[in-house]
Each structure stands twice: as structure tokens, then as C-alpha cells.
Image (cartoon, rainbow, N blue to C red):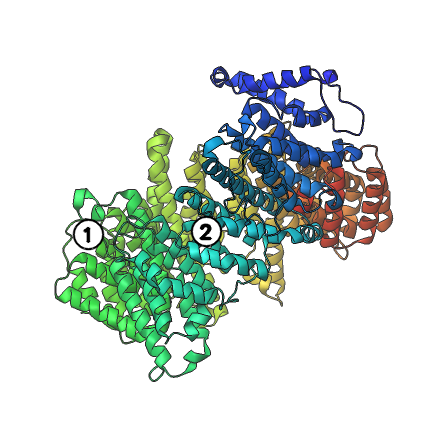
Amino acid sequence: MEEEDFAPTHNLSFPVLPQTDIQQVAQTILRLFDSSTSANPGLAKHLQQELQQIQGRTEAWGLIGGLAGHDDANVRFFGAHTAQVKISRDWDSLPEALRPSLLPLLLTILGNAISPANQQSYQPANAVVVRKLFGSLASLLLRLPFPYFMHPLLTVLQTIRASAASATALPSSLPASGYNTPGGLGEPGPSHSNSPFGTNGSEAEGKMRHKMRLLALEWCAICVEEISRAGLSEQKRNALRRHIGSDLSVVVDTITDAMNGDPSTGQQERLKEAEAACKCAESWIDYGLGPDELNALLPPLYDLLPLPAASSALVEVLSESLFKFGKGTKILTEPLLAWVIGSAGQSLVGSADEEPSEEIIAFAKLLAALVEHSSEWIVARIKQNDVQALLGVILRLTGWQGIGSVEEHVSELTLAIYPLLQEAVMDSDLFQAPHETSPDWAVAKQFFRELVQVTRRKVRWPGEGDEGGTLGGLDKDDREAFDSWRRDAGEVIVGAYYILRDEMLESLTQTAAQQIQTGASWQDIEATLHCIRYSSEAVPLGEERSLPVLFGEQVLSPLSQRPPRGKGEERLRLTAVCLIQAYEEWFKFHPAHLLPVLSYLVPSLTSSSTISRSAADALKAICDMCRKKLVEHIGAFSELHGKIGDLGAEEQSKVIQAITSVIQALQPADAIGPVEGILNPIVDRIHQAVSAAQQDPVNAQSILIQSTAALTACFRGLAPSGDDMFDTADEEDGDEKEERVRLVREDQRMVLLRTRVEGAVAEVVQVWNGDTEVADAISSLLKYATLSSSETLISLSPLPLLTLVCLACERSPSALWMSLASTLTLRINSPPSPLTKKKEKTAEEQQIAEWEDLERWNVVADVASRLVVVASGFLAGDGMSNNPDVVEGWFKFCSALASRFPGVLLRLPTQVVEAYMSLGLLGLGTQERFSLKSASEFFVAVLANTRYPSPLEPIADPLFAHFGPLILRALLLCAGSEGPRSVIPNMAELLASLVARVSPSLMASWSEGVLMQDGFPDPRATIDAKKKLKEHILRSRTARKMREALHEFALVARGLEGTTYGNATAI
């Protein structure tokens, strides 16, 4: 259909299109939904585009009425959909004088669509059409001035009832109470002689009333859902709330009438109405009902329990209504408590051993919401029988028969309840009394004792451990689900410990010891250890009653002697290993237990892959935590180092880091031999891997990655930890130890070792062939080789590594080398050298310090001059758009250079400096968020480090005289038109930096020249908006004010001012 074919009438009635146009659109729709079209995706796409184009035209308003009476539901749906699309997106295209006439048109279309006298209303697909009409009316409510749509909810409800009344000769007025009047839609009325349903009129009228009640509920639900998702401003939202406030009583009556049910309809129909009413109520509760409306809804909701929809609506009342946060206990908590412990609730829970029904699942969610709402009320009455009965029901749900999250999904819904109860107990004034004499404490402790027993039973693995070759007979997905349940249950154990304290830990430890002594199954022992493991979060570091037993002769020692007998025993060992790691900090204060623990961990390293990984993690954690305490056992670690060849690659790295962290605690002079013994074999392996990679890169890759990771682990382990909970912190003076490290670093053995390490690093870099895994290994190696709060025996200087990275980047430009160049630039002289930190220097020391500075500047200048050549070539043309990762890495290097060495940058040859600035301008023109962010940060760094009183200010002034206007233009173009709105804060920070750097007169001149260009940055940017932005630029000095001004300007320039999207995405 051609655009000029539309011929709408030009009067104040709503547009009417020629019948030929209507038929042409209908034929297109029918063709789209024809079965033959589904086999031709290309044709379907073409037809969809054609319909969208038609829908986008102003004349498409005439399709709303033109398609409404078509026989095919798909055509009618398109008409209703067009109404909603035009109202939501093209409202301004409808002349203001015609807008009020849209409401009666839609109401008329709705009345016809649902009329029992209209045969089209019985088509199954007609329901979708009606829903779309409801959506259109809701959208119209959000657009039409309120005086033109008075009592919107009531108006549509009256249309629904009038449509039914026209077919049944019922009175057309809507009763004040909604529908619940004789002859109305709420109750069956007397038969009418002119009923269109003939002799079977009563039954048919009952079905019709049922259908109209469902439609009424559907309208009420759709309307409030459209309002909720509209993203209205607070002012508009409050005005709308006042406008529909008078209709709320009718909405509530509509909902409660459906909940109470019509005796003349069948059980299935009444159930369907009740579910729809509950869902509608839930939407309105979320919207925000007042106390009167909530009070009217609650009794029928209670009567509908345990209907899942009723439970869900009550959850909404407890969680989102004005009764949330513990309010309304008289009308919420007490009735729900009575229902739960009454015959209905008890019958629902039953013996807690059947397949959980939907009612049970919804009931468990309701209980969780009830406890969250009323935890303080419950705890304050914990001695009452009814409250204790409620807690008993919760425990029964938690202990539901079956494997958690596998065979049943009830228990997981209750796990969040117990931390709430625990916190309420701890916060309650009643529980400030002594534990030993308080009856409240006695009840609470008994409840949590039962909880621990239920949890310990539920976390037990099923079966005997080897059914079908799988743990507990569970497949992978079920094992993961049960593991997740067990982790969540572990949090319950933590809360129980805060109530029971030493009593709980002692009971679990004694249980574990007894189980081991009596030969209990691995599942029972493992379940107990699992509970103890998760208690670690709350157990104090000074605990000395139960943990010594646990890690002593009664538990850990006999566990180490259990022979592996399949997957069950493997799981038991894994839990024991994780238990040890959970208490890693405890061992720092109880070093006597370190050797037994290490004796358990070391054999675990050569167990199954899962146990081996966890054992390596535990060993690394304990060595990190207790390195000072383990120094006296350094010989044992030497033996362990000799066995690491039997471990996997990942485990080797972790064990190496564990061993080197203990070596780090030695006196520097004593560490020379152990460090050589660890690093030299690794360097040899790297040489071998490099040689192999030169011959066969693919097969040598894994060896290269493994040996590089091992070297990285050495650097990580030998770095002193900055965490004061690690036990290297002692009375020793930090400067004194740093001096000893510096002296030992000058030992020829350490100098030679570092030279070998540097050579190995260079070889790895040289054979890199672009593989991402090798790249990650190189990146970690270079970062940890130079990352330390103070120098270590083997930490490397960033300068030769920076040159090495530059060479690699010249050979093969990539984001990896750019990023590493940034990292290494920031690491130069960090930490500062001893001479840099020394305030009073001798003449000789001053000369050495100056030589060190000159060496740094020369290396940085050389790298900066070479990398800009690489970047200029690689990022030319489409390079910026095609390589966003390289762009981001490049500008990170630029930012590092401008931040740490601005003098070096600005004293480079003029053409080199201009190349940096030109690339920065190109970066501000990209579309990728992170590229834009890093480019803006480069300019911010340059501006910040050349401001007064910087001595670089005179050098930078000519540079900014040329590039300043270009930077201003680029950032305004990005913020106001071409860039993503998410980078406006970054552009605002750059603008603030530019304003602070240059004189007001220059900025005024630049702003005038840039902003007053025609169509800049977008034709939609008005002169007033530009003037306002210019005023903000000249007046504001903070990034926050610049951000607000730029965002306001961007909304105008992008055509988003005053739109829902623009308001909803305010920055």
C-alpha cells in the first residue's frame, strides 16, 4: 500500500480509511500468518517490515477502527496492537483535537469484541485481541489528560458489564459494590424472558457471568501492570494515583467477589476465578493499596488458602505492602499463625514425606515471608504454644523427606528463615538475660538444637557411595544441586552456632569422634564434619575445647588411616580437607596442630583430581597464614618439593607458592639456598619448554604454560603479604628487614638467579605465537615479577621488562603488550629505591640517584617513541573500530605515561607528542565504551599534570592552544550525539579538567566557536540548549555539575528530552 493511498477524513471525528486500504492491510496480515509463509522466512520478514512501516505512518491511526470488525482474529489483533503502539510511541502524531475521541472508539471496539452477541467473541484467539485492547486502554490512561478519562477503571468495567447486559437484558448500570448484586455479574440473577440463551438460559448466563468476571479481573490486572512498568516520574505517578484513587473500591469489590465465588458456577470455574483474582490482587498490592483495601482483601485470601495464588498474594502483602516490616500483626501474623497450626495447615504438611505439591511449595514461601515480616513478634512470644507449633511446622518442612533440591524443593525455601530468627533472638531484649536461667533462651536453644539435628540428617549423602559409579547414585546435575543445597544449609549452621555456641561445636565434635570409633558409615561422618566446617565462620580463634579434639588423635588421626574405598571415602577426605582450610586462621594461634594437619594434606595432594585441588588450596592457605610458624619445618617442605612432579599443573603451582611463602619467612641470608633450589629447576624447565616450542609449538604449549605458571607462583609466594593477619608481622623493623633484603639481593648468587629468570622471561615472550592461554601466563608472570610492596630476593626491575614488552609489541601488536606496558610503566620505581627515599644524600649518592632517574627517563622515552609508531600504524583507518581491546590497552599505557612521566611525554619530539594527541582525538570518536573511557582518562591525566604550579605548564600551553578546541569539539560530539550515553560522566570529567586547565577567555572563545556551528552536535540541539551549556561550562568547575549539564544537553540533542526513556536513564 503506498503512503499517498491513505485518505483520512479531515474533521474532528476519528480518522476513517477507505475500505480498499483496510482490505489491503488485512490481506498483508493474513498473508503473514498463512501457514505457507512460515516456510519462507525471507517473505515473513518482508511482510513484517511492510506492516511496521504502515504502522509507523500517521494515517495508521485509522487502522484501529478499520480492522476492528474483521473476521480474522490476527487482523483484529494487529488493529489493537496498532492502537497501543501509536499511543505509546506516536502520540504526538495524533492531532490534539482528535485525542479525546480515541477513548470512545476503543471502548466501542472492546464492547463489540467481548459481546456475547458477537460470534467473533467465541473465537479462541479473540482473548489475545481483548488483552491487547486492555493494554491500549491502559496506555491511553497514561497519555490522555485526566479530565477526558474520568474513573478509568470503572469506565472499562462498566463497558464490560454493559456488553453482557446487552445480551441478557440485565440492567446496564454498575452497582456501587461492583458486581455482587442480584442480577449482576457477581451472583446469579433471575431468568429473563428475552434471554438469548433459550431454554438453557440459566446455565449459559452463568458461563457468561463467569467469562465477564474473568475479563473484569484481566482489565484490572493489565491496567495496574502497565502503570507499574511505565517508568513515570514521581510527580506524574502521584497525580495518576490520585486520579484512579476513587476507583479502588470497585477494583477491590471486583477482586473479592471473584474470590468469594459464584455458587451457580462449577468448581473449576470458581477455582479459575479465584486464581485470577489472587493474581490481580497481587499486582495491585505491589502497586500500593491503602489499609482499607488491604483489610478488605485479607479475609477472602485466608479463605482461599492453601491455593498457591492466594499464598503468593499474601507473600506480596507481607513483603511489599504498607504492612511490611512487621506492621499489621493483628490482621496478618495472628490469622496466618492460626491457619498454619490449625487443622488445615497441619493437614497440608501431613507427614512431610510425600511428593511436595504446588500448594506445599507456595506454603513454604508464605512461611518464609511470614517469618521475615514477623520475626521480632515471633521471638517475643517464643514461649507460647502456638509460636512453638509454628516453629515445629517450619522444622518439618526443612526436614522434608528426600534429597534437598533433587527429590524435593521445599526445604530450600525454609533455609532463609533461620538466620532471621537467629538475628531476632540476638537483638531481642528478652534474650539479654543469662542463658542458664532464662526460659526464653531454653526454648530458643532447644529449637536450634533440633535444627542442627535436622540439618545434619538432610546434608547426609544418599546411598553407599558407589551406585552406578557415581557418588550417592546421583548424576552430575543432581550432585551439583545437592551440593548447592548443602552450602545453603551450612549458613543455617552458622546461625545455630551463634545461639548454641560451644555446646553445638562440642556436641558435633563428640559425635564425629564417636562415629569414627564405632565404624559409622562415611555418609554419617561426612555430614557431621560438613556441619563443623561451616561453623568456622563463627567459631572464635581462641577456641580450645573442641577443635584440639577435632584436629587431634580422636578425629583427624583415625581419618588419615582410613583406606580409600571408592567415591564415598573420597568425598569424606575432600570434606576433611575443606574443613582444615576453613579453620586456617585458627592454626596460626594453635601451631601444635600444624604438623598433623600437614600430614593429612600432603597425601591428599596425590588423591583424585578434586581432592588434589582442594588439598593444594588448603596447603597454600595454611602456609600463607602460618609461614612464620612453619619455618622450623622447612626441611619437610624440601621433601615435598621433590614430589611435586607427581601433581597436576595447577596443583604444582599452588604447592610451589605454599613452599615459597614459607621460605619468605626465613631470614634473607638463610633463604638463598632454598630460593635457588626452587627456582633453578623451574628456569631449566622453561628453557626446555622454549626449545620444544621452537620445534613443535602446539605440543609444547602446555609445558610452557605450566613452567611459566610455576615461576609466577614463586614470585607470588616470595612476596611479603600486606595482610596483618598473616603471621610474618612481628616486632622486626620494616626498614631493617628491607635493608637486609637489599644486601642479599646484591649477593652474586641472587644476581645470577635474577639474570637467569630475566632470560627465561625473554625467551617465553619471544616464542609467543598469539595463543591466549600463553598470553595469560605471560601477563601474570610479568605482573607478579614486579608487584610487591617492597623488594624481594627475586623481584625484577620493570625497566628491562618494559623494553622487552615493547619489542614484542613491535613484532606483533596486541592488547596484551599494550596493557603490560601500562602496568610496567606504573611499577617503575614503585616501591621507591633506597636512594629515592633517602632525604639527605652524599654527593656520590646524589650522582647515582640522578643516573638512576636518567636511566628511567631514557627507557620510558624510548618505549614511548616506539609504541606510538606501532599504535599509529595498527589503529589507522578502521583499526580503532576493529580492535577495541587494543585501543583500550593503548590508552591505558598513554594514561600511565601521562600520570607517572608527564615530563618525558611532553619533551619527546614535537611530531611524537602530536601523534599522541591525535590518537587521543581519534579515540574520542570511537563508539566503544571502554575505548572512549580510556581515551578520556589519557587527556585528563595530561591536563591534570600540566596545571599550575606544574613546571610543565609553559611547555604544554602551546600544545593545548592547538588541540584544546579539538578536544572540546570531540567530547561534545561524543556526549551530545555519537557516543553512548554511559560515557557522559567520563566526558564531563574531561570537560571539567579542560575548563580548569585553560583560561576562561580561551574557553569562552572555544565554546562559542564549537557550539554555534550549525547542526552541531545534532540538528535537534537548540540554540537555547547550546547557550545554556556554554553558561554551565564557563560557570561550573566540578565534574558533577558538568555531568548534569552535559546530560541535560545530551537529552535535547538526542531528542530524548521529556521522554520516559530519557527520564528513566538519567545519569
Question: From this viewpoint, is residue 866 visible?
Answer: no
Is the residue marked by circle 2 packed among few (<14), some (14-19), or many (20+) residues within 10 Å? Answer: some
Q: Quadrant of the N terminus?
A: top right
420 sits left or right of 43 in the view: left
Please tell me which residue is depicted at 20% across the width and 57% down the height of the picture.
523
Query: Does residue 1022 appear anywhere in the picture?
Result: yes
Q: Is residue 1003 left or right of residue 941?
A: right
In the rendered view, would you say 950 is above or below 990?
A: below
* Secondary-structure class at tag 2: helix
Amino acid identity at mark 1:
Gly
Q: Looking at the picture, tell me which residue is in the foreground, 773 or 181.
A: 181
Mark 2 / mark 1, whichever is N-terminal: 1
* Of labels 2 and 1, the one closer to you: 1
Image position, residue 541 (x, y; %): 36, 72
Mark 2, residue position: 784
Question: Mark 1 = which residue?
Answer: 568
Q: How many numbered tags mark residues here?
A: 2
Q: Amino acid at mark 2?
A: Tyr
Q: Identify the residue shown where x is 52% and y is 52%.
A: 256
Query: From mark 2 to mark 1, how far is it between C-alphas?
Result: 39 Å
